[in-house]
Amino acid sequence: MAEWLLDVLLVIALLVTAGSVLWSRDLFRAVVFFIAFGLLMALAWVRLHAPDVALAEAAIGAGLTGVLLLDAARHLSNGKSGGDDNKEEPS
Amino acid sequence: MTLWLMAGLLFTPLAWAVLTLLAGFRRGRVVTWLGIAIQVLVSLALWAVVVRDGGFQYPLGGWQAPLGIELRVDGLAVTFVLLTALVAAASGLHAGFYLDPDKQWHRYFWPLFWFLWAGLNVVWLGNDLFNLYVGLELISLSAVGLVALGGQSEALRAALRYLMAALLGSLAYLLGVALFYGEFGSLSLSGIASALGQDSSGDGTGFALVLMLFGLALKTALFPMHRWLPPAHGIARSPVSALLSALVVKGSFYIAARLWLELGAPLGSLALAQLLGLLGGMAVFWGGWQALRQRKLKQVVAYSSVAQIGYLFLLFPLTWNTTEAAALQAQQAMTLQVISHALAKAAMFLSAGNLIMSVGSNRVNALAGVSHFLPFSLFSFGLAGVSLMGLPPTGGFAAKWLFLQASLATGQWWWLVVLLGGGLLSAAYVFRVYRASFVEDSNIDHFFHPARRLEIIPMILALLSLGLGLMAEPVLSVMALTFANGEGT
Amino acid sequence: MTTGALLPVFALMTSLTAAVIIFTLPEQKHQLRTAVNLIAAVLKLLLVGLMIWGVFQGREYGISFPMIPGVEFVLRADALAMLFAGLSASWWLLTTVYAVGYLEDSPNRSRFFGFFSLCVASTMGIALAGNLFTFFLFYEMLTLSTYPLVVHRGTQQALRAGRTYIIYTLTGGAVLLFGIAMLHGFSGDLPFRPGGHFADMSPDLQAPLTLVFVILIAGLGVKAAIVPLHGWLPTAMVAPAPVSALLHAVAVVKAGAFGIVRVVFEIYGLETANALGLLWGLAAIAAFTIIYGSARALSQSDLKRRLAFSTVSQVSYIILGLCLAGPVGVAGGLVHLVHQGVMKITLFFCAGNYAETLGIHRIDELDGAGRRMPGTSVAFTLAAFGMIGTPPLAGFITKWTMGTGALAAGMDWVIAVLVISSLLNAAYFLPVLNRIWFREQKNAWPEERQWGRFETSAWLLWPPLITAGFLVLAGLLASASFSPLGWVELIVAREVDL
Amino acid sequence: MTPSLLYAFAGAALCGIGLFGFIVISHLLRKLLAFNLMGSGVFLVLVGLAQHRSGPDPVPQALVLTGIVVAIAATALAVVLIRRYFHLSGKTALEDPARDTLPHQGPREVREAPRE
Amino acid sequence: MKRILTLLPATAVCLAFVSGLAYSIWQIAITTTSVDLPGLLGENLDQSGVENPVTAVLLNFRSYDTLLEIGVLVIAGIAGISVARTSSLEDPELRTSDTLLYALQRWLIPLMLLLAGYLLWAGSDRPGGAFQAGAVLAASGVLMRLGGIPMDFLRPGIMLRLGLSLGFAVFLLVAVTSALHGGEFLAYPPELAKTLIVVIETVLTLSIAMVLLALFVSAPVNNAEEPEEGGSG
C-alpha cells in the first residue's frame, strides 16, 4: 500500500509540476519547474524499473535541457520581449 | 550482390553526409557528384534486382523482426527509392550551381541534403514502426535545417513553424506506436498486420491508428493543417523547395498509406476514411484557390503542393471496404500521383528558381513579357504545369484517370467533383503564370539567361513527368511486385 | 512492326519534330525556320498522301500500346481519319506559307511557329486517334498549344480572349473527360469501330448511355461551338489571321465536330444513337445553332467577327448532317467538314490580307477594296458565294446533298433550316461583296498598288487563291471519286451499314 | 491495475496537458516546454503500457532512450532557431505572417499595382 | 471573453484526446499480447556481447535506430551551427563573475568528468552508457563555458565538424565493414561484438557531448543574413 501511495504521490507531483511549467507567469520560473519535472520523471523511471532511462532523464532531460532553456529564457527576457501570453491558434 | 547493394544504399548517403560536412561548399559539390552517381547507380541496380527477382526482407544486423529491424524491399519501395534518387540527384546537381558558393553557410547544404536523402530511404524501406519514427525525425530535422539555411528572419519563422508542426506530428505518431506496442508487443508493421489478421482483437488500437494518421497528415500538410507548408516551401532556396515539395511531404504520406493499407481494413472506419477523403478534397480546392491569389511565384507553387497533396488522400475512402479491383486502381492512382507530382513539382520549383534568377524578382507579375525571350525554364514550368493540371498524356492525368475510375467503380461519385474541379482550378493558377509571361506591353528589355546546365535539369524532370503517363503501365507493374517468397502484402 | 504501322507515328512526328527544332532556333534565324516549317509541312503532306492511297486500297495503318492499366494508346488510319488528316495536312502547308508572309517583321515568331507546329501535331493526333482516350489526349493538347497563339499579340484584349478561350475549352475538356471516364467505367476501353459498340445493348444500359451521350456532346460541343457553348469563338478573333484561319477552318472547331462524328458513328453507332432518340435532340440544337449563328453574324460590323459567327453557324451543318441518319445526309454532313474548311480558310486569308495590306478591320471600310486588291477580292467573293450555296461551288454540294438526305430521312423541316440559313448567309455576305466591288473608295489606302507587283506579298496572295480554286474544283468535280464528296461516300460505304 | 498502468495513465494526462499548452500558448519557448512535457507523457505511455503485463521490458526502455535523445536534439535546435529569430525580429511568437495575396478583385487589378 | 472563446475549443480537443487515449490504454491493458519480445530478447542476450539488455537493444538488436538517431543529433548540430553566426566565443556577457560558481566549477567539473567516464564504462553490463555519459560530459562543458573557459574547438571550423561527425563516422564504418564481408549492414561478428560496442560507445560519448555543446554555444551574435530569393526586385 505504501508503494502505491508513493506512486500516486509521484504521479500527482508530476502533473502538478507539468501544470506549473505551463502556467507560471515568469518564463524563468517555468524553466525551473521544468527542471524539477525532469527530476521527478527520473524518479518515475526508477519506479518503472528503468534505471538507464532514469539516468538519461536526469542527465539530459533535467540537466542539459534545463541549462539550455535557462540560458535561452534569460536571453529572451533580457531583450525586447514580446507578450508572454498572446493566444494563438495552433500552428 | 543484393546484400552489397543494400549496404551501399544505406551507407552512401550517411557516409556522404559526413564527408561533405568536412568539406567546404565547392569541394562538397565535387564529392556530392560522386555520391550522386553511386547512389543513383545503386538505386537503379536494386530496382533491377527487384524487378527480376521480386522483393525481399532485409534484416539489419542479422536480427529478424520482431527482435531486430527488418527492411522490406518490395516493388513499391524500390520504385520510390529510384524516384528519390532521380529527384534528389536533380535537385542536388541544380543546387551545386544555383547556390552561391561564397556564402559560408551554404557548405552545410550538402550534409543536410545527404541526411535528407538517407532519411527518405529509411522511410521507403521501413517496416518497423519505431524505425519509421526515427526516419521521420531524420527527414524533418534536416528539412528544417535546410529551410533555415541562411538564418534570415523570415526563413527562421518559416523553419520554426515547420519544426513545431513536424514535432507535434511526430509525437502523435509516436504515441500511436506506443499504443500499438502495448497491444501487440511488436513493432514490425507486417507482424502487427498478421497478428490482426489472426485474432482481430484490435480493441483500442483504432485510436492509435487515428493518432498516427493525424500526425502523419499534419506532417503531410493536409488541409486544414497545411499552414506551415507554404511559408516553408516558399522561402527556402529553390532546390530545397524542390526537395521538400517533391519528396519530404511524400515520406509521411507514404507511411500513412502503408499503415492504412495494412491495418486500415480491421482498424479503420467508414467515417475516418471519408473524413480523410473530404479533407483531401477541401485541400484541393483551398490550395488551388490560395495558389490563384498569391503574388509571389514560389508561393503559387507552394500552395499548389497543398492542393496536389489533397488528391493523395482520396486513397483512403477509395480503399476502405471496396472491391479489390477498385482498391488496386486507387493504389495505382496514388502511386502515380506521388511520382508525377514529385517530378512535376521538383521541375516547377527548380524552373521557378531559374526564372526568379532571370528576372530578379519573385513576383508573378515580374514575368511580364518573358516569353519573348523564350526562356527554357518557362517551358519546363509549363510542362510541369500540364502535369499538375492533370491533362494527358502526363502522369498527373494517368493518376487522375485511375482515381476517376476507382471513384466510379466504388460508387463514390462525389470525388469526381474534386478531381475535375481541382484540375480546372490548377489550370487557373498555372495559366495565370503563363498569361503573365505573354504580356507584351512591358518594359522588360534585359533578360538574364541562366546557365544551360541549370535549365536542362528541370526540363528533364518535366519531360519525365510528362512521359510518365505513357509509361504508366510498366511503372505500375513494378509497383505491384511483392515478396518473392509470397509473404507480406 | 512494319513500316505501315509506323506511318501514323511519322505523320505525327513531322510536326512535333518541327516544333522542337523551331523552339530551339534563335529568333533571328527566319529563313532557316521557314525552311524547317515548309519541309515538315511538305513531308507531312506526302506521308498523309501515302496513307490516303493505302487506305483507298483497303489497307489500314495502326499502332497501339498500353498506357494506363485498362487503357491503350491507339493510332489508326482509317478512311474517316484520313478525311481529317488530309484536310489538316494540306491546310497546314498553306497556312504556314500564309503565316510566314503575315508575320513578316513581327516579334516572337519563333514562339508562334513552334506552337503552331504543336497545334498541327495535335490535329493530326485527333485525326488518327483510334479510341476516345487517345482522342482526348490530343484534344487537350490542342487546347494547350492554341492558347499561346490566341494570346500571341500580348495585348490586354488578346489576354482576355485567351482567358475566355481557356476557360471554355478546359471546362469542356473536363466535361468530356467525365463522360469518357463514365463510359469507360461501364464498358471498358472502347476503340473506334464502324457501327459502334452498342448495337445490341441491354435495356438497363439505355439510361446511362443517354446520359453519357449528353455529357460527351456537351464536352465536345464547346470546341464545335454549338450554341450555348460558342462564346469563346468570336472573342478569339483578336488572334492573328492565320490563327483564326486555323481555329475556324481546320483545327479547333473541326476537332469538336470530328469528335462528335466519331462518338456518333463509332462509339454509339448511328443506328443505336438514333434508336435512343439522341439524334433528334442533337438535330434540334444544330438547327438552332445554324439559324442563331447566321442571325448574329448579320449584326456584326467587324469583318472577322462576322466570319466568326458564320463559323458557329456552318460547323453545325456537319452535326445536322449526321443527325439525318441516312447515307446521303451523313455524306452531306461529312463533306462539309472539308468544304466549310476550304471556304472559311479562304475567307480568313482574305480578311487577313485586307487587314494586313490596307488596315481594314470593319466592314464599312471595305468600300472599293475590289479594285485595289482584285485577286484577294475574287477569292473572297468565291468563298462567300460558296457559303451562300451558289451552284456549282463547294457549299452548294453540301447543301444539295444534305437536302436530298433530309428528304430521304423524312425530315423535311431540315430543308427549311437550310433555306433560311442560305438566305441569312446571303444577307450577311452580299452587302459585303457589294461594298467591295460596287462602292467608291472612301479613304486613301495606306499604300497604293504599284504596277508590275502583286497587290500584296506573294506569300499572302497565293494561299487564298489556291484555296479558292480548290473550292471551285470541289464543286465542279464533286462526282469524281477523288473529290471530297467521293471520299466521303467511300467512308459512308465503309462506316455506315445502312 | 499495476503501478505501470498508473504511469501510463499519468502519461496520457501529461500528453493532454502538453497538447493544451502547445495549442494555446504562442510563446515559442513555452511551446517548446509543452512539447517536452508531451514527449515525456508519450514515453511514459510507451513504457508503462508495455510493462503492465510483462514486467520490465528493455525494448521500450531503449526506445525511450532513443526518443529522449531525438527530443533533446529537436529541442536544442529549436532553441537555437528561437534565439536567432528573437535576435533578428525581437519576437518570441509566430504571429501570422503578413498575407501576401492578391486583393479580392482578382488578377486584373494586380497589373496596375506598382512593381516593387 | 474572447480568450475564453479561443480556449474553449482547445480545451474540448484536449479533453477528447485525453479521454480517447485513456480509454484505449484501458482497452489495451486488458488484452494480452501475442508476441513475447522480452522473452525473445532474453534468449538472444548472450549473443549480443553485452550484459545490459538496454544497451544490447540500443547497440546491437536495434542498432540501426541508434545510428539514425545519432544522425538526427548531428543534423541538429549542423543546422544549429549553420544559422549561428558565432564570430567569437569570448562573449563578455557569458563570463560570470560569480565566485561561488567559479569555486563550484573547480570541484564539480573533475567530478563530472569522472562520472561520465564511469557511466560509459558501466554501460555494457550495468545501467549507463553513451547517452548518459555524453550528456554529463556536455553538462560539464556547459559549466566550463559559463565559467568563461575558452573552448576554441567549438568555433565553427574543421575541428568542430570533425568532432560532430566522429562518433557517427566510426559507427557507420563499423556498420559497413560487416557488410563488406558479405553480411548484413550493421551485423557485428559475434566474437568482436563487445569490443565494437565499447568502441562505438566511447566515440559516441564524445560526439554526443560535442553536438550538445555546439548547440549550446550557437547563440546568435551578429547580423549576417541572406536576402530572400529575388526579394530585391
Image: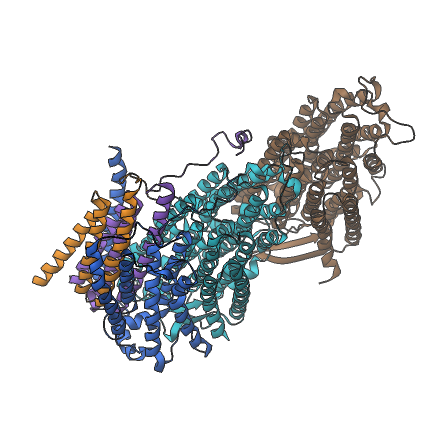
Q: Nearer the viewer, residue C230 or C157?
A: C157
Query: Residue pushed farthest bottom?
Result: E191
B127 displayed left or right of C249? left
B95 displayed left or right of C325? left
Q: Residue at x 81, y 22 (%)?
A: C445
Q: Is residue C3 above or below residue B486?
A: above
**Count of numbered circles on the image:** 0
Q: Is residue B366 above or below residue E156?
A: above
Write down the quadrant of residue C401 in the picture. Answer: top right
Please name the color used to draw chain D: purple
C8 displayed left or right of B466? right
Please name the color used to draw chain A: orange
Q: Nearer the viewer, residue C44 or E198?
A: E198
Q: Residue at x 31, y 57 (%)?
A: D71
- Residue B273 lies, in percent from the top left, at 38, 50
Please name the color used to draw chain C: brown
Residue E208 seen by the camera: yes
Write down the quadrant of residue C30 in the picture. Answer: top right
- Residue C192 lies, in percent from the top left, at 65, 50
Query: Residue pushed farthest left?
Result: A1
Q: Is residue A88 above or below residue C453?
A: below
| Chain painted blue | E
- Residue C136 lies, in percent from the top left, at 61, 46
E120 displayed left or right of B17? left
Q: Image quadrant for the C terminus of chain B?
A: bottom left
- Residue A70 lies, in percent from the top left, at 26, 51
Q: Nearer the viewer, residue B107 or E94?
A: E94
Residue C185 seen by the camera: no
| Chain painted cyan | B
Q: Nearer the viewer, residue B267 or E1?
A: E1
